[in-house]
Image (cartoon, rainbow, N blue to C red):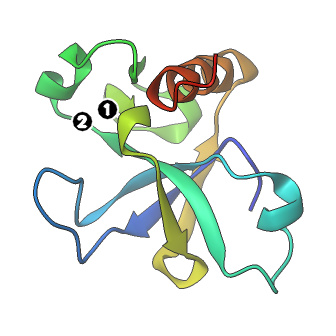
Amino acid sequence: MKRGEIYWANLNPRSGSEQYGKRPVIIVSHDVFNESFKWHSIIVVPVSTSNKQSRRGPTAIVLARGTAGLKQLSVALCHQVTTLDRSKINEKIGLLPSSSLYEVDQGLKIALSLE
């Protein structure tokens, strides 16, 4: 797994308004962690296809249909960044172009107040 790749993941169990079920996630953790099988957790941003999610503001990054293998217009939910056990991450979908990963990074900076 590498930073910027999109995978199918099992986001159960979850609660409240958290994204759940089988859905795409963007790997955002550092590649040093991602490539080490001694490190069991991977930091991800869940992806939604809900049009409602696209109106959440600067932490909701719209990804055009076809971006990195996504079959529908999608939204990276940077305000729902989470850590998953590696076992919950399954089949690779694709790799975000650097411009889209930059936008996700900006969304994470806003969500986590890093600037």
Residue holding disc 1: 72
Compared to 22, does 72 lie above or below? above
Secondary structure of the residue carrying tag 2 is: loop
Determine the residue positioned at 85% across, 68% down: 35
Compared to 22, does 98 lie above or below? above
Tell me where residue 47 appears, x and y as whole percent.
37, 42
- Give the residue type that dot 1 points to: Gln
Q: State the residue in front, 8 or 13.
A: 13
Marks 2/1 in contact by CB < 8 Å: the verdict is yes
Q: Quadrant of residue 33?
A: bottom right
Return the mark for residue 57.
none
* Left or right of 11, for residue 109: right
Compared to 12, does 81 lie above or below? above
Secondary structure of the residue carrying tag 1 is: loop
Density class for disc 2 (Cα within 10 Å; few <14, some 14-19, many ≥20) is: some
Compared to 90, does 75 lie above or below? above
Instruction: Give the spatial CA distance, label 2 vs label 1.
Output: 7 Å
Residue holding disc 2: 49
Q: Quadrant of residue 56?
A: top left
Determine the residue positioned at 43% across, 67% down: 9
- Quadrant of the frame with the N terminus: bottom right
Report the number of numbered marks: 2
* Left or right of 74, for residue 101: right
Q: Earlier in the sequence, mark 2 or mark 1?
A: 2
Determine the residue positioned at 65% across, 46% down: 28
Q: Quadrant of residue 95?
A: top right
* Left or right of 91, for residue 11: left
- Give the residue type that dot 2 points to: Thr
Tell me where residue 26 appears, x and y as whole percent.
55, 46
